[in-house]
Image (tube, rainbow, N blue to C red):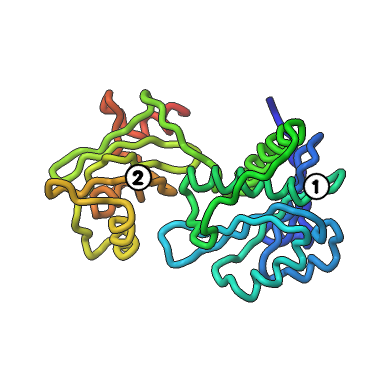
Amino acid sequence: MGKTVTTYLVDGDPKGTQYVFISNKICQMYVIPRSNLAYLNREEKLQKPAFYILIGEGEDTKPQAYIGETENFRERVKDHDSKKKFWQKALIFISKDADMTKTDVQYLEYVALTKAKKAKNFVLKENKQIPKMPNLPEYQRDSMDEFFEDIQFLSSFIGCNIFEVSQPKQEHLFYLESTGYQAKGFYSVSGFTVLKGSIIVKDTVSSLKWRDKRNKLITEYTKEIDNLLVTQLDITFSSPSTAASFCTGTSCNGWVVWKDKHKLSLDTVYRKSLE
């Protein structure tokens, strides 16, 4: 079923402040860059109970986020602005209709942290633990579960995959095999995912531009077993070529080297099929 999504660019800049909502839904998302927090003084809706996500880049190999809830985002963000360095953008979710309660946004925080920690797409080092699920009446919990589905959709709509868990399909698995490596993965809208249990090359050629980052990924995601470097988690890369370079330790064209069980390349399956 199709959806109609309305995006309003407050200052006319696609990278600036905006708000987004789905037609016939009550969930509304505000996207506010850290450089424009003064906007909060103009928007009364953001001085009420809200669920929010701070996103940015830290020193880790994955993007970083902080998930929270508040009775007044304008006041709460003052503390985050002074104490949290990593974030560049805030996603704030409110109800377009009746205001949510403190318990409502606490429930959203609980669900969000549970799902984000399962997805493992963002580093959540400042969310030390998942809070206990608040006591909501069943009818209100159902309502907030529906609200959270819209949060997931709107987050994904602007390119934030914090809650997305990629699921491989057997017929879409691709393989990369040669001396020193034996990897498998799949291609999706999120990029190319190298699956847990893949064997990758230990050494990185000096000419690889992101050599240091690859070495950090090796430390974070792999373990040496019987003198082989084996991935311990699924890892999603922005492109098939980056995924292939991670596995081989050298630059290569992922569209060509990844091949399915019929020896068809990723390029043949996903690109040439459109010709």
In the figure, 170 relative to 122: above or below? above
- Residue 43 percent coordinates (x, y): 84, 61
Whether residue 86 is visible, yes or no, is: yes
**Residue at the spot of label 1:** 100
Q: Which residue is at a point 74% across and 54% down the rendered structure image?
A: 30
> Image quadrant of residue 55?
bottom right
Label 2, secondary structure: give it: loop
Which is more N-terminal, label 1 or label 2?
Answer: 1
Q: Which residue is at a point 30% across and 29% down the rendered structure image?
A: 260
Q: How far apart are marks 2 and 1 (CA)?
A: 37 Å
Residue 219, numbered circle: none
- Residue 116 percent coordinates (x, y): 53, 47
Q: Is residue 116 left or right of residue 25?
A: left
> Image quadrant of residue 81?
bottom right
- Residue 177 percent coordinates (x, y): 20, 38
Residue 233, numbered circle: 2
Label 1, secondary structure: give it: loop
> What crowding class fits label 2: few (fewer than 14 Cα within 10 Å), some (14-19), or many (20 or more)?
some
